[in-house]
Every structure is written in structure tokens, then in C-alpha cells.
Image (cartoon, rainbow, N blue to C red):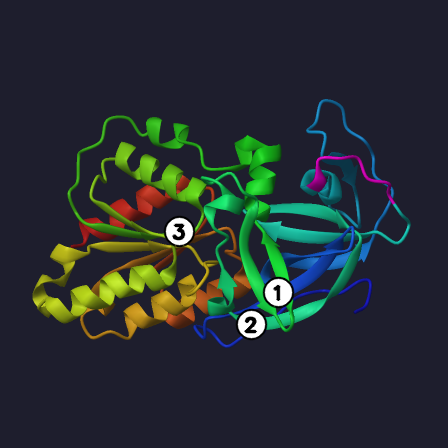
Amino acid sequence: MDNKTPRNGILLETGTNEIEIMQFTINGILYGINVAKVKEIIMSDKVKPMPHVHPAVEGIFKPRDLLITVVDLPYFVTGEAQEHHEKDLFIITHFNNLHVAFRVHTVVGISRISWRDIMKPDKTVAGEGDSITTGIAQCGPDLVTILDFEKIVAEIAPETSIQLSEIEHMGTRERSLKPIVLAEDSVLLSKIIKEALVKAGYVNIEKFNNGQEAWDYLSKLSKETDEKDIKEKVSLIITDIEMPEMDGHRLTKLIKTDSKLKQVPVIIFSSLITPEMQIKGKAVGADEQLSKPEIGHLVEVMDQLLEKQ
């Protein structure tokens, strides 16, 4: 792979439940990141240190016209200071409307796999929502640890994550019993999103850990419910994109091709709302696509969609 590799364009057909994983190493151990988060890979550069920052933050650098924060990923992963080498690489990412560069030792390559080939680590490894591991991927003969880059950034800078204060600023709101389905694989984010929605008055929420679990529930509702009554069982669906077993695009496509469920609005709420992803979401029929961590905006859009019912 070139040491400077732009990642633009739509690489995968929409809704096929596939993902491209970029594999990289830290101290010889394989890790992975969703290619959709990667803007480019460059050789490590000189970094300007900044005062009073998280110990994993090296500082900032300015490739072209953009100031980018640099995270020492080997330090964050191991908890120990690591010697920097000239051949280290910066993986420049874009998610949650942020550009962040992560130092790694090598980049190995890219594997295209199904989300079904990504497994959640059990609680002996992941704990109760404290892990920075979002899944373990089978890439050919290798097991690759997929890191939760949103959680890493949220730990370094909590203000970049979902803020319940956005809901509090909305003031007193009416209580709604309309049934909402939420598909979100992050234990921490799932808990925060549900807490925010309940605070906003949406108290009837069915929460699922991935798209497959949500689809099992929704398809059962579709089989057991008359078309005219389906919105009494599920009024609105919120889904992340990146989830083991079934991603949000595949889930949305299944919903929008179901004769009964297609009338239910679907909001994709993800850190990956880029122009390319907007096209993918539109192709599978998403009613709205919103970027994390804008929880206040999510509630406003929910209000608008549910008022039409």
C-alpha cells in the first residue's frame, strides 16, 4: 500500500452487509479500522505539543490547510510510553465531524468481509461497556481487533460525545408512548442515547445490540401485525451504521423492502455521515441521516417525523 492513500468514493454496493477493514499494527499486534473512517495514510510528521491535554494526545500538526490533533495510539492501547520511529504512520480519520490523526506502526492492507464475520468480545474481555474493542474480525487466517475510535476520542475529549445538556436545554417536554426501536452496538452509547430520549419524553424504547437483533424483532412484528396497525407497534426506528452481524444500511434496506414496515420512518444516527454515506443511506431508503453526537438534532427530527403520523 502507498504511504499516502486517499480513500474516496463508494467502494461497496449499498446494503450488502459488507465492510472494508484496514489492518494496521501496534507492536506487531493486528488492529483494524473501518475504511469509511479513513481519509488518508501519511508518514508520521513533526507534531507541535499542546499544554494541558490528555497524555495520549501528542499535539497538533498541519498538513495543507487543516489543523489536526494527533493521538498516540500505541500509548493509548498499551498505557505505556512508546518510542516514536521515522517509519511510523498517521492514519487520518474523519468521523463525528472531526479530523483526528492516529499514530500506528505499520499498515498491512485492506480486507472486505461481511459484518457477520465480526464478533463482539464477551464480557471477560470487554467488561460492561468499558472496552475500546468494538469487535473481533476474521480477516482470512487472522483475527483482527477492531478498535472503537469514537470511544477512544470520547475518553480523550468527553465534550466530543453525546451531551445530555442538549436535551435539558429543550425545557419541559410532553411524554410520548410511541414505540421507538433503537439499534446501537456500543453499550455506552446505547445507554446514553436511551437516557437522552427518555429525558426528551420518548419513554417507550426497544433497544437492540445490532441490526440482526433489531431485524429479528421487526420481521416478527411484520408477520404478526396488520399493515394498518404496524405503526402502533413501531412508530420510528433509529439505527447506527457500524454494527456486528448486520449493519444499519442492510437493516434499513430490509425495512424499506418489507411491505408493512416500509411506512415506518428510519433515522440513521451515525458517526459516519459523510457525503458518500449520505448517498448510501438514501439508496437504501433512510428517511433521515444525522451525525453523532448531535442528540438534540436527533430529537428535533424525531418530533417532526412523529408529528406526521
Q: Residue at x 58, y 34 (%)?
A: 155
CA separation, marks 1 and 2?
8 Å
**Dots 1 and 3: beta carbons under 8 Å?**
no
Question: Helix, strand, or loop for circle 3?
Answer: loop
Quadrant where the image shows the N terminus: bottom right
**Dots 3 and 2: beta carbons under 8 Å?**
no
Mark 2 sits on what residue?
Answer: 113
Above or below: residue 11 compared with residue 128: below
Mark 3 sits on what residue?
Answer: 184
**As shown in the figure, which amino acid type bears the numbered disc 3?**
Glu
Q: Which residues are magenta?
A: 78-84
Q: Please report whichever mark, 1 or 3, sits nearer to the chain's N-terminal start.
A: 1
Q: Is residue 214 left or right of residue 39?
A: left
Confirm whether the magenta stretch covers residue 81: yes
Q: Main secondary structure of the magenta part?
A: loop
Above or below: residue 264 compared with residue 45: below
